[in-house]
Image: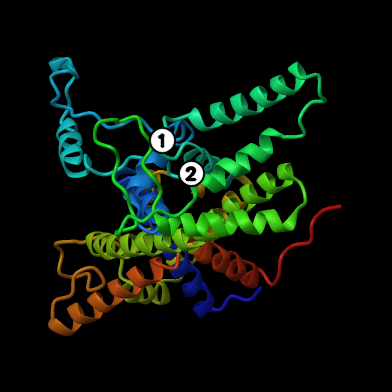
Amino acid sequence: MFGSETLEVAIGLVLVYFIMSLLCSTVTELITRWLSLRARTLKDGILKLINGDQNLYQVISENPLFKGLSPKDPKNPRDPNNPKDPEKEHWWDLIKIVKWHIFKKNHYGPSELPPATFAQIIIDTVMDAGKKPGSGYTAVASSVNDIRKTDEEKGESKSLLTESFKVIETLENNLVLTDTGSGILDKTPNYTDIVPIISNENKLVLKSLLAAAKTKVNTWDGAITEFRASLEKWFDDSQQRVTGWYKRKTQLIVLCLAVVICFGLNVDSIGIAKSLFSDPALRDTVVAAAEAQVEQSVAENVSANATYTELRAQLDSLNLPIGWTTETGDRNRRPDDFPGWLVKIIGIFITAFAVTLGAPFWFDLLSKLVNLRAAGKKPEKT
């Protein structure tokens, strides 16, 4: 076995970083869920995709397919129409009231939107542009049936006109550019159930996708299928940018949390490394905990579902110099001079920045270090 002190100290530090990363990730998930960060980021992505057309986004958000994926609208906890038993009120109800007042104007939409659902919503919206919801498809079916009925009354063969052709024709007619000056028409004030006309910017995009779909196939059914696939790809490509936005936001939250938690718990990388170097028994204990952590995580995936309390207890069980103390003898926990405090602050910031790399990174590194210390992974039993 390779029992290098440096390797064992590295294993101890990586184990601490792994546990702290899981802890910060757990708190971050709670914060993002409370702030509806996924839903708000998706809304920003859709608005960016449709050139900031608020009218079109309103129609999309009112579509039953969209609303079916959305959580229930938040209700004012103090609304008299939403009575609540005073005996069942809790202190956290105050947090709900504050949250409602802060975010009541924001859209509480779905956290994820499948590309196929988005494509269907756009087609529905264009079909019904300037009409009552659902009237576009009804008009198409009625028109085709009337033509076929007329042909039958004349004793002629049924018309070759299909509903797919009428759908394409309706889409093209509703995507004709309008001279609006600003490019966007407001909703008709006297008819709240009328779908607003789509802006010219979005019409140009949809017209180009529809024209490209028609050139790729030679049937009307195929044109609709190709147009739907183009809309899905258009939306899917934009979601890569939305994913990047969300990751940057969560990384900022993780960084802020890491700094606060590391200072609050006094997780000092330099102090931990000094303690591990000077105490062989402590190194053996931490390395054994690291090996158990790797085996348990691989076998049961326990760490992915661990709670904050469990992770904090796991961190305390390592017996490392973590946490503040009022005693002046332990310099790793409480320095007694300015250089000591400066080193401690640097050590805490090292831990905070290490935590931002994420639990998967540190678990992968921890597994490699544990296998390296064991002189290679044991061969699997046949």
Snapshot quadrant of residue 97: top left
Viewer-closest of 242 and 183: 183
Q: Element at badge 1? A: loop
Say which mark, if any, is on residue 332: none
Q: Is residue 71 left or right of residue 381?
A: left
Q: At which x and y percent is residue 380?
A: 79, 56
Circle 1 sits on which residue?
Answer: 70
Q: Residue at the spot x=30%, y=70% of the render? A: 268
Compare residues 263 and 152 and report the one nearer the observer. Answer: 152
Which residue bears the numbered disc 2?
305
Name the residue: 60% across, 43% down: 169
- The spot of residue 40 in percent (x, y) is 34, 49
First reached walking from the N terminus: tag 2 or tag 1? 1
Percent from the top left, x then y, of residue 194? 36, 33
Quarter of the picture containing the N terminus is bottom right
Residue placed most toward the observer, 281 or 116: 116
Residue 53 visible in this rendered orientation of the protein: yes
Whether 253 is drawn above or below 350: the answer is above
